[in-house]
């Protein structure tokens, strides 16, 4: 399934001459891995950052401590800022971000499987909240694929 999604993303972005960057936390680089497996991805994919720790989100992406303190690392607001900051840093047309709790324990009083993802464009940012079930690896893959599906929805309508 994700090959179809990736192929469609590649065709849309390439045909429109649009670019993409990624800021990942809980997916740990899996979105970038999927994207770079697409032949010709260099025509649209510019950069990816794995900002796993709060310090990396602050220091690399410039996420404000106030956002992390007020909403937590696992939040829609953090996902929004991650996507918006990486898009501005890399000067791309689109950016995807993910942040969540893969488990096994509750994190920030948020359950295992809770993931927020965002897609940022020059026209605004869309955030999606998902609750996935499964092992850490399964949740990670489901989150990466859901983020790519969200990108496809947004890019197809842009």
Image (tube, grey):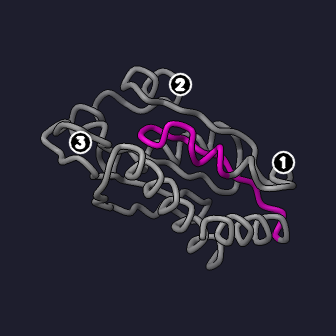
**Residue 83, labelled with which disc?**
none
- For label 1, count other residues whose C-alpha is less than 10 Å away and answer few (under 14), some (14-19) or many (20+): some
Residue depicted at 60% across the width and 60% down the height:
121
Which span of residues is magenta-colored?
16-34
Q: CA distance from mark 2 to mark 1?
A: 23 Å
Where is 158 relative to 100, above or below?
below
Does 82 appear in magenta?
A: no
Q: Which residue is mark 2?
A: 60
Q: Quadrant of the N terminus?
A: bottom right
Asked whether, in this view, residue 54 is left or right of residue 59, the answer is: left
How far is mark 3 from mark 1, CA to CA?
35 Å
Do residues under tags 3 and 1 come within 8 Å of each other at their CB atoms?
no
Q: Residue at x 70, y 39 (%)?
A: 47
CA gap, disc 2 to disc 3? 19 Å
List the residue tagged with mark 3.
Answer: 71
SS under mark 3: helix
Query: What residue sits 28% from the left and 31% below the top?
Result: 66
Q: Quadrant of residue 131?
A: bottom left
- Residue 56 higher or lower than 153, as above or below: above
| Residue 79 horizontal/vertical position (percent) | 41, 47
Look at the picture and state if 155 lies above or below 67: below
Question: Residue 43 location in percent, x, y?
Answer: 86, 53
Can you give x and y, in whole percent of width and height, for residue 31 in the image? 58, 48
In the picture of the structure, the residue carrying the numbered disc 1 is: 42
Labels 2 and 3: the sequence-earlier one: 2
Q: Is residue 1 left or right of residue 136?
A: right
Q: Which is more N-terminal, label 1 or label 2?
A: 1
């Amino acid at each position: 399934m994700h090959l179809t999604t990736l192929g469609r993303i590649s065709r849309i972005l390439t045909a429109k001459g649009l670019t993409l960057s990624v800021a990942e936390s809980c997916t740990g680089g899996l979105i970038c891995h999927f994207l770079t497996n697409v032949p010709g991805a260099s025509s649209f994919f510019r950069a990816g950052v794995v900002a796993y720790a709060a310090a990396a989100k602050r220091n690399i992406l410039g996420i404000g401590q106030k956002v992390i303190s007020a909403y937590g690392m696992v939040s829609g607001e953090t996902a929004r800022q991650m996507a918006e900051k990486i898009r501005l840093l890399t000067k791309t047309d689109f950016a995807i971000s993910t942040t969540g709790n893969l488990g096994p324990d509750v994190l920030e009083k948020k359950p295992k499987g809770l993931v927020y993802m965002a897609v940022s464009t020059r026209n605004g940012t869309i955030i999606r909240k998902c609750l996935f079930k499964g092992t850490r690896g399964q949740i990670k893959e489901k989150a990466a694929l859901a983020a790519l599906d969200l990108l496809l929805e947004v890019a197809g309508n842009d």
